[in-house]
Image (cartoon, rainbow, N blue to C red):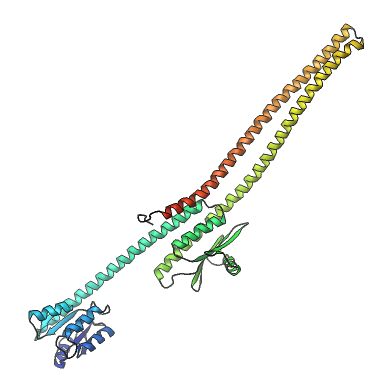
């Protein structure tokens, strides 16, 4: 479609002449006064306005000002056509916002050249403005993406230290607040399920909806809401920005990434919990074995003391019985030799018990060292889990004016 030229002139002869001059190149519309000219331009913005100055009612200067003050017609070029050609008249046309000023009577070639120049310049300005807008939109999108990536990275850092469902849910809720999203979520494990929202524990109905999401597609649109599903997590966003397609698409991409990251973390968390349970069983078995070893060690000590007492009593009894038995010296020597051999054998067994006692004591000490080390590692893990969210909260409460994200 050819460009539209709006002629605003109370002289019908001038309008007919202009239409004959340029009507074969452009579409022409004529208005006989300033008020109707402004109304016509607002209804259908022209490519160029040829504006007379002296007209009944509103003059050309006022009509031009109204056009330049309205965002619909602000960029439409205006050429004044007037018999008033003094410097003050031209200055008034310039102050009103006109692009050019041609004196009547005018040269046809001059008018057509100036219209062509204005149309070319206007087209270039429009293209330049569009490119600037594209560049601005691209820059804003890039900045938004950088900010979104920062939120996701912070979420991943917090989740690394989250070893229970409630801590994971809190991490997700903080991230959703940074995205300015109102969500409810469900975390699912082998032996635990948590349904959570900004208000706390979800209602039974919402919990049921979240549970049913587990068998649905990755992304499900539910009217004004959208659900993001993985085997171990479902997130429902209550305030999806559907009126802003670019923002809406970015939110869907980000939430899909968040849901996938949470699902992977919950899978790892399940493995960690399973390993901890196995470790607890091994530690319990180790503790029970250590208790048994300590009990055996105590029995050995008691038996050793009892054996020593028995032998000492036996020696004393035999020596006292020598007087009343009436044994010959040879018999006494033989009996004494037998007693000494028995005592030596008992002492040998005692020495073996001492060696076994030392071995059991060493094994007990090793068990105690293993238990102490395992206890320290578990305490350090719990401390690290508690410290990371506190450090993140402290960083959030500081001055963020220089942070990239």
Residue sitting at x 47%, y 56%: 155
Report the front residue among 122 and 186: 186
Q: Is residue 217 above or below residue 159?
A: below
Residue sitting at x 42%, y 55%: 397
Q: Quadrant of residue 355?
A: top right
Q: Is residue 402 above or below residue 89?
A: above
Residue 110 in view? no
Name the spot of residue 161 as percent of width and height, x first. Answer: 51, 50
Report the front residue among 20 and 136: 136
Name the spot of residue 265 as percent of width and height, x first. Answer: 53, 54
Residue sitting at x 76%, y 28%: 302
Residue 111 in view? yes
Q: How many marks?
A: 0
Report the front residue among 399 and 227: 399
Quadrant that contains the C terminus: bottom left
Is 355 on the left-hand or right-hand side of 149? right
Name the spot of residue 61 as percent of width and height, x first. Answer: 17, 83
Q: Residue furthest left?
A: 86
Is 261 on the left-hand or right-hand side of 204? left
Quadrant that contains the N terminus: bottom left
Q: Is residue 25 above or below residue 384?
A: below
Report the front residue among 367 and 215: 367
Is 277 on the left-hand or right-hand side of 104? right
Q: Residue furthest bottom?
A: 12
Residue sitting at x 83%, y 14%: 338
Name the spot of residue 382 as percent of width and height, x first. Answer: 55, 47
């Amino acid at each position: 479609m050819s460009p539209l030229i709006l002629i605003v002139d109370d002289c019908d002869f001038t309008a007919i002449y202009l239409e004959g001059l340029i009507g074969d190149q452009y579409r022409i519309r004529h208005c006989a006064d300033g008020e109707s000219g402004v109304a016509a331009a607002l209804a259908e913005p022209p490519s160029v306005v040829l504006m007379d100055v002296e007209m009944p009612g509103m003059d050309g200067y006022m009509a031009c000002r109204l056009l330049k003050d309205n965002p619909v017609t602000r960029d439409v070029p205006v050429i004044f056509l007037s018999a008033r050609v003094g410097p003050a008249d031209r200055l008034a046309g310039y102050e009103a916002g006109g692009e050019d000023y041609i004196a009547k009577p005018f040269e046809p070639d001059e008018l057509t050249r100036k219209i062509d120049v204005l149309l070319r310049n206007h087209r270039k300005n429009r293209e330049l403005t569009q490119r600037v807008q594209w560049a601005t939109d691209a820059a804003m999108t890039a900045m938004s993406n950088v900010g979104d990536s920062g939120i996701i990275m912070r979420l991943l850092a917090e989740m690394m230290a989250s070893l229970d469902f409630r801590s994971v849910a809190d991490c997700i809720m903080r991230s959703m607040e940074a995205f300015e999203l109102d969500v409810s979520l469900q975390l699912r494990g082998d032996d635990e399920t948590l349904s959570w929202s900004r208000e706390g524990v979800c209602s039974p109905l919402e919990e049921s909806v979240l549970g049913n999401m587990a068998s649905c597609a990755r992304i499900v649109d539910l009217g004004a809401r959208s659900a993001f599903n993985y085997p171990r997590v479902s997130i429902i966003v209550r305030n999806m920005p559907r009126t802003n397609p670019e923002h809406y698409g970015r939110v869907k991409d980000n939430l899909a990434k968040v849901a996938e990251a949470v699902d992977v973390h919950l899978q790892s968390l399940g493995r960690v919990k399973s390993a901890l349970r196995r470790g607890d069983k091994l530690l319990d078995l180790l503790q029970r074995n250590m208790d048994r070893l300590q009990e055996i060690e105590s029995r050995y000590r008691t038996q050793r003391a009892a054996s020593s007492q028995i032998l000492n009593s036996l020696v004393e009894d035999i020596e006292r019985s020598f007087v009343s038995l009436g044994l010959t010296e040879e018999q006494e020597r033989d009996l004494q030799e037998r007693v000494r051999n028995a005592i030596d054998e008992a002492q040998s067994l005692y020495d073996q018990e001492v060696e076994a006692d030392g071995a059991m004591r060493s094994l007990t000490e090793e068990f105690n060292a293993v238990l102490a080390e395992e206890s320290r590692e578990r305490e350090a893990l719990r401390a690290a889990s508690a410290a990371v969210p506190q450090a993140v909260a402290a960083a959030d409460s500081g001055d963020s004016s220089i942070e990239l994200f």
